[in-house]
Amino acid sequence: MKTVNKIELFDTTLRDGTQGEGVNLSIADKLMITEKLDEFGIDIIEGGWPGSNPKDEEYFQKVKSLKLKNAKICAFGSTARFPDKIESDNNLNKLVEAGTPYVSIFGKTWRFHSRESLGLTDAQNAELIHGSVKYLTGKGINVIFDAEHFFDGYKDNPEFAVNMLKAAENGGASTVVLCDTNGGTLPEEIYNITSEVKKHISKTIGIHCHNDGELGVANSLAAVRAGALHVQGTINGVGERVGNANLCSIIPNLMLKLKLETKSNVNLEHLTSLSHYVYEMMNLVPNSRAAFIGKSAFAHKGGIHVSSVLKNSRMYEHINPQAVGNKQRVIVSDLSGQSNIRYKAKELGIELPDKQEFSKKFVQSIKSLEYEGFQFDGAEASFELLLREELGEKSSFFEIVYSKINVMFNDNGEEYSEAVLKVQVDEKVEHTAADGDGPVNALDRALRKALVTFYPEISKIHLIDYKVRVLGDSDGTAAKVRVLIESSDGEATWSTVGVSENIIRASLQALSDSLNYKLYQWHKLNTARVI
């Protein structure tokens, strides 16, 4: 029976990933991400460097209490500093104290670094690597050797670079990882060099790439095609400088495109949710255009594209979005055709007239509005209200009959904003006022204050994002502005849009759409319950 070589997935989000600018994780954050990575199917999780800071040391103590099903925990560090002081090296002993089944240590495989940075001869550098690995394996630890700057080192002096790998192999390392530390190597170089290394190394070969040339994923796949069976990376590609190779792209490419098996059973359909979870824990804005897991990864805007996708999604989708836990989306915009409208209507559960004339007319209406500055691909709640209004459904639950904004400044530079509104619901008019942190916040408070008497559920809604874009670059302060608002009721989120030469009016339009949209949803739900 032919032996199938399975890919070992090594995640370094909690170590290399935290070196990215703007990334900071608490111990609790790291423990929760550890559990998510384990559930997903990662083989080895590199948790940090216990010799570098107290937080990582505490993580390695607390992670022992987690009941992981698949993953093994790995501590990270460097080789000893001096060849004759290996057993007393503080860094190595901190790794031993971490008590993890795996340890990854890095050593110099670029002669330039070995001589210039450490001041070592070739023999001393080899002894440093061999002795450090042997010391750790002698403690019963599975050692992964990270060959730092390997590809730069190999291009500079192949013999030296390979000899350092042999030193780690002879010391007992189970895996030697070829690191593109500077992230500047090209895929064909990665493939060729990895192929050559396989001729000299019998242990498992791994790959660790950075993304400085936007080739981290491509380089990782090239190494696998050349024989690497251990792949390192981070979730969402976070990491030093522009980041590490992105596991959210590497893993589906390995499984769906190269048809390779992984050591653990990977829950690929949870990939998108894992990506979003890590973004949330790191307090980073998700990349909507990220391959496989981005919000736009399977979004279709052009009318011809949508028409084709409705017939067979394979025409414009390279995989089934559900395979990675994502979903197909159709966007309505000035590029839309009738197919877009009918797709969105079906998605929203709205029945359209069979006559194509309706869709054609509504498409032209949308295109006219977008020409004026509206944007519905980022404000689908406003689009739904427009469509329902066109169909004659009640989509407006109130009318603003009067509004006034007061913004005042005193001599101390303090600002005071107040909104005064008259809001009509059926035949009743509510006259109210509210102050706020700026005019838009005052408007939001006043509007919800006026409506809560009629619709108590309004109190659950709050604004979570507010964006303004000036349209046109030649009209100065008289230019139109587009306001996009994202709202939430604690469970769902939705977006609305407003456009005007007056930023307050545009904001009020988007705010009104936001509340009307949710009121419609609640009205529809309650009506269904009564029926």
Image (cartoon, rainbow, N blue to C red):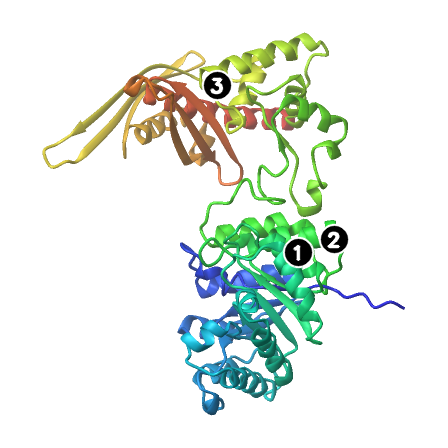
Q: Earlier in the sequence, mark 3 or mark 2?
A: 2
Q: Report, in whole angstroms, how far the alpha carbon at label 1 lies from the one at label 2.
A: 9 Å
Residue 485 placed where, x, y %? Answer: 43, 30
Residue 105 placed where, x, y %? Answer: 53, 76
Q: Earlier in the sequence, mark 1 or mark 2?
A: 1
- The amino acid pointed to by label 3 is Phe
Do the residues bearing badges 1 and 2 touch, measured as CB atoms within 8 Å? yes
Residue beneath label 1, please?
A: 221
Residue beneath label 3, please?
A: 397
What residue is at 75 percent from the left and 60 percent from the top?
A: 261
Left or right: residue 182 versus residue 415 is: right
Q: Provide the secondary structure element on which disc 2 rests.
A: loop
Report crowding for label 1: few under 14, some 14 to 19, many 20 or more residues within 10 A (C-alpha). Answer: many
Quarter the N terminus occupies: bottom right
Residue beneath label 2, please?
A: 258
What residue is at 60 percent from the left and 79 percent from the top?
A: 163
Residue 230 in view here: no
- The amino acid pointed to by label 2 is Leu
